Image: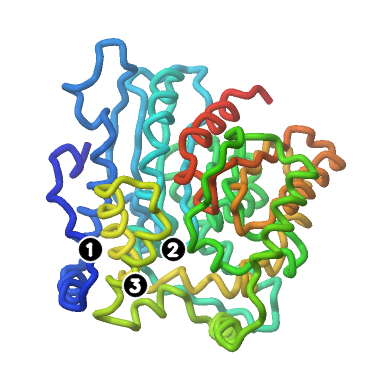
Amino acid sequence: MAAISSPPPPAREIPTTFSASLRSWWATSDKGSAIAEKRLFHRLPFLHPESLAPNDNPVIAESSLVHLDSPKHYLNTLSIKSASPTSDAPPPVVLLPGYGAGIGFFFRNILPLAQWAGHRGTSVYAVDWLGMGRSARVPFIIKANRKDVANRVREAESFFIDSLEVWRNKMQLEQLTLVGHSLGAYLSVAYALKYPDRVNKLILLSPAGVPRDPDQTTAPERELEPPPHSSSSSVELASHNKVNEIRSEQAAAKPPQSRRMRLFVHLWEEGWSPFQVVRNTFFWAPMLVGKYSSRRFSGLTDEEKRDMHDYILHITLAKGSSEYSISHLLAPGAHARMPLVDRIAPLRVPITFVYGDHDWMDPEGGEQAVENLRKAGNGQARSYIVNNAGHHVYLDNYKAVNALILKELNRRS
């Protein structure tokens, strides 16, 4: 695998002092970002062929920057292809991360998908959105008037989904199964609406921008806490009672409208991004990121937390780009300017909604979307609740989510 087969140097400790934070800040670079991603992926056993059993289904893995049609535009891509592709193989799977995140966040999900690809003779890709992760940090410009919501949304969505379509052409792929998280799930639906013939299935992990009612989306503070552990079963269909239970918990956790929240709303509407705020702390940024990553990903091992921290730090401190799309696509609190629940009905492909039981995304949005799809003649939509999981449902309870994704990939249309 290009630039991944050799072991990377170990990550620094998560900084707890100003001097350590300063050293981490000074060391960030594009090269460091690539090394940080490499640390996360180096855990994948198929990168070490000598350790595989003889009956393992072999795959060919490659990390590359796929250049698009526009100069200096490229998408960071992890490609995992079956060594024995078959003519009747299912369409390849494409993993798409959430807002400000990158493909390294999927390091616990790629192995079972790679095994599935090897067995089925197909491929799996993980792709950073344009302007995020390790993809090209190109200027993000919206020409529409701020009051012209429909065109603002259209331009912002097109920035992402048109570049994904160019990437699909470059990769010579006919159809895709999109597995998106959060904003990546929102954009996966937007892609399917614009390019319906190119999508085989949609698997939406804690999707942003689905519900209509902004008062039913809790504030992002809920995402800062790791999900509590319970003895409940891992995955269940999203029954109306379960959805109401989660919404009641969200309502109880929603903070009152404070001066800090009013400032947050003002900065959001003015086009700031949370990553811009972190970058503006300069030398303190590594400590801020460290506090978040240690707290939010407390379920990871110490080594995984260090590697995740270093990865998040590098992609957060990189040049701001498509992160500025957030105020055009979503209102404060992640309520969509143009909610997907009102747009999703034309789709005719299987669609799976997945929420954590401690999510801050409203699962009623998925419930309503499934009903709207059913009324429109698409009975292939389902919604699930994964217990012991928050917004990063694919990491918090990765074993349950991996099993659910494989189940949905193998489900017949």
Q: Earlier in the sequence, mark 3 or mark 1?
A: 1
Residue 351, can we see it? yes
Q: Residue at x 55, y 35 (%)?
A: 175
Q: Residue at x 52, y 45 (%)?
A: 229
Which quarter of the figure has residue 251?
bottom right
Name the residue that disc number 3 marks. Answer: 288
Q: Residue at x 36, y 24 (%)?
A: 82
- Tag 1: amino acid: Asp
Name the residue that disc number 1 marks. Answer: 30
Name the residue that disc number 2 marks. Answer: 100
- Location of the N terminus (image quadrant): top left
Nearer the observer, 209 or 263: 263
Which quarter of the figure has residue 137?
bottom left
Of tags 2 and 1, the one toward the viewer is 2
| Cα gap from disc 2 to disc 3, whole angstroms | 16 Å
Circle 2 residues within 10 Å: few <14, some 14–19, many ≥20: many
Circle 1 residues within 10 Å: few <14, some 14–19, many ≥20: few
The reply, left or right, for residue 8 in relation to residue 94 is: left
| Cα gap from disc 2 to disc 1, whole angstroms | 16 Å
